[in-house]
Image (cartoon, rainbow, N blue to C red):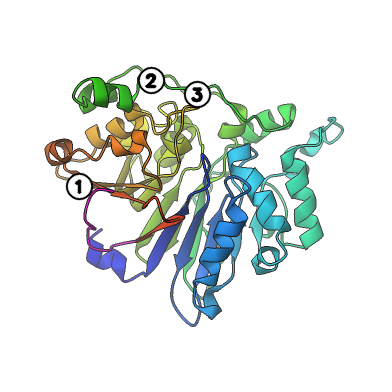
Amino acid sequence: MSDAQVSTSRTSITVFKVLDGDCIFIRCLGGKASFNVLIDGGRPSSAKILLTFIDSLPQQDRHIDLFVVTHIDADHISGAISIARDSKLKDLVRAVWFNGAQQIVGSLASLPLSVTQGDAFSTTIRDNNWPWNSITNGTAIYRRGDRSALKVSEDHDVTIRVLGPSVDALRALAAIWAEPREDNGDRSTNGAVAMGTDAALNIQALAGAQYHADRTIPNGSSIAFLLEHGAARVLVCADSHAETLVTAIDEEFGGELQVSAATLPHHGSKKNMSSDLAKRVSAHTWIISTEGGDKHRFPNGESIARVLMHRKPGAHARLVFNSCHKEALVWNDEQQKNWHDYSTRYCDDSEDWITIAIGEPEAPTGA
């Protein structure tokens, strides 16, 4: 699909700085007001940032038509709780997608549940009287394998096709429903920064590094989906396992999915972007949401290298980072960008978010 075709859909993606988590706002413009989708809440600081952003929008667009909280890990849900409890933001939400205990436990309803952030968010949903998974009549959001897209807005022609989780992933989560972990053990000690500072960045070597799949249960339960608005197609991967997405793409799209933009799974973890997944997703723009740090050192170089090395011949890639931390800046190498035909765009240190208009002309590269 060409940029000219995509630009007519008037779709934009805003990625907020919320420490190591995800908080993403998709605006589908058209008619008298936009249709807005908020994905996750990052860390608790997100509420203030999100409110500032919404106040910057035209009056008729200051609402959240759908709030998708993908899973219960703290870097996605702790900020969602702060958003849900904010006196101004909570009144802007018109519907929510979230798989809480009442959706996933089912026949295991007698399973003892601890007081978790997932339960806290569920309680807040009820307190706010938000329509909860109403598109599936209150049941869990998961890939049902019927290849049908869910029409979430008739007025704006917005559809969502759920690609994950699988029902088996939800059953696994039901069995271990507990306090979300702050650390999933996915630390990187030999990623892009090490290779980019001690020696020349070797993208081919990074792409060929041995792959070890993410096996964490909460990540496997992530709601992943394809949003379509006119000609624009946005793939939201959350922290999904690569194998979940590969299976969905094979069964739903015949093994190849072409999109306008995609979020790099699990903030760019090398355990969530396999070569198999990179070969199946063709995206002009890849969005990396993380402020990095010593804890995980995301994005891992292997993840981005697999995207670059497994593109279709002649396909340009744009890497969009919501932070200028060192693991992101290592990709701002003019020689590497020329060799591997990709461009970069970074959120300025003084800004709290970065917005990408789908189909926009290439912005200047660099920080």
Q: Residue furthest bottom?
A: 32
Viewer-nearest of discs 3 and 1? 3
Q: Is residue 249 visible?
A: yes
- Residue at the far front in the pictured view: 350
What amino acid type should be assigned to the residue bearing mark 1? His
| Vertical placement of residue 164 versus 204, above or below | below
Q: Which residue is mark 2?
A: 211
136 in relation to 103, above or below = below
The range drawn in magenta is: 357-367
Which residue position holds label 1?
316
Q: Is residue 273 above or below residue 236?
A: above
The one nearer the camera, 156 or 350, is 350
Tell whether 194 sits left or right of 338.
Answer: right
344 vs 232: above or below: above
Image marks 2 and 1: residues in contact by CB distance under 8 Å: no
Q: Position of residue 229 (x, y in %)?
A: 42, 65
Res. 148 visible in picture: no
- Residue 251: x and y in percent read 44, 40
- Disc 2: CA contacts within 10 A as few (<14), some (14-19) or many (>=20): some
Residue 186: mark in rendering:
3
